[in-house]
Amino acid sequence: MAIVISVTNQKGGVGKTTTAVNLGYFLAKDKQKVLIIDFDPQGNATSGLGVSKDDLELSMTDVTMGQAALSQAICETKFKNLYIAPTTPELANAEVELNKLNQKFVQLKNAILSVNNQFDYIIIDSPPSLSLLTVNGMIAAEYLLLPVQTEFYALEGVAQLLETMSLVKKVNPNLKLLGVLATMYDKRTSLSVEVLEEVKKYFKDKVFKTLIPRNVRVAEAPSHGAPIGSYDKFSKGAKAYKDLAREVEERTGVKK
């Protein structure tokens, strides 16, 4: 059975999609079979892996509305062991329709159950909001990975997210916080250092040892439809995400 991880933060611009894509890539490089589910209507994980939204016959919109099985929507990427369940902006409209369904909170969970034994890891890239899509991702997941930007207002909204997590645990008691990931870290600035200390005080041993640095190459990679490990494998960002993948394997107990 796959380890299902929801990468979630209701605050935008914290490196959520970047983390989902690059964590998935380095897990796949370590011979794990990985599926990334793009559950954010912006579809950045889809384009960031070089998949054209214009060429899609099926997407997560069809899966969410029960019009297609998840297995039908999954696409191979050009990277070995890495697959994507793509999305388009139409998913935002599907969320409105999803609200009318009886099983509106477990649509994604039910879809994942049909492919769970085909992958080692399933990573859900959730939207930057506490929406019905985000809640679906949390109910479908075993673990929550929380990226936090080491800048001013880093912990803004985190308390509300954790409160939502507590409510979700009534439906999904298996949900655990896998870890908190400090992103866009710049050790040269006192602000980054201070915010990291604040995050560690709040989350203690749940903070990953790996710090994701502010790195131009990481920011450039999605425009080339590639994870940082493929775009520039010698960059600081690539090394950091490779280290994160190892930490995730250790924390989830899956190592090949």
Image (cartoon, rainbow, N blue to C red):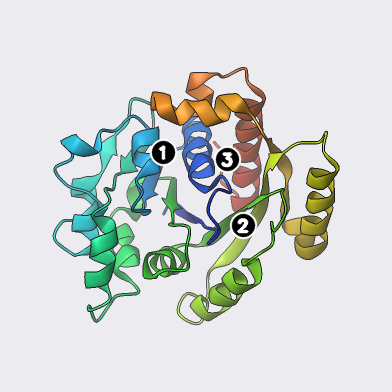
Q: Nearer the viewer, residue 111 or 47?
A: 47
Quarter holding the N terminus is bottom left
The image quadrant of residue 49 is top left
Name the mark nearer the viewer: 3 or 2.
2
Name the mark nearer the viewer: 2 or 1.
2
Q: How far apart are the alpha carbons under marks 1 and 3?
A: 12 Å
Q: Amino acid at mark 1?
A: Lys
The image quadrant of residue 245 is top right
Of callouts 3 and 2, which one flags the residue occurring earlier in the amino acid sequence? 2
Q: Is residue 225 above or below residue 105?
A: above
Quarter holding the C terminus is top right
Residue corresponding to mark 1:
33
Disc 1 to disc 3: CB gap under 8 Å: no
Q: Nearer the viewer, residue 217 or 212?
A: 217
Q: How far apart are the alpha carbons under marks 2 and 1?
A: 19 Å
Query: Callout 2: helix, strand or loop?
Result: strand
Q: Amino acid at mark 2?
A: Leu
Query: Callout 1: helix, strand or loop?
Result: loop
Q: Amino acid at mark 3?
A: Lys
Residue corresponding to mark 2:
178
Which residue is rendered at x = 35% and y = 74% of the image? 105
Question: Which disc number belongs to residue 255?
Answer: 3
Disc 3 to disc 2: CB gap under 8 Å: no
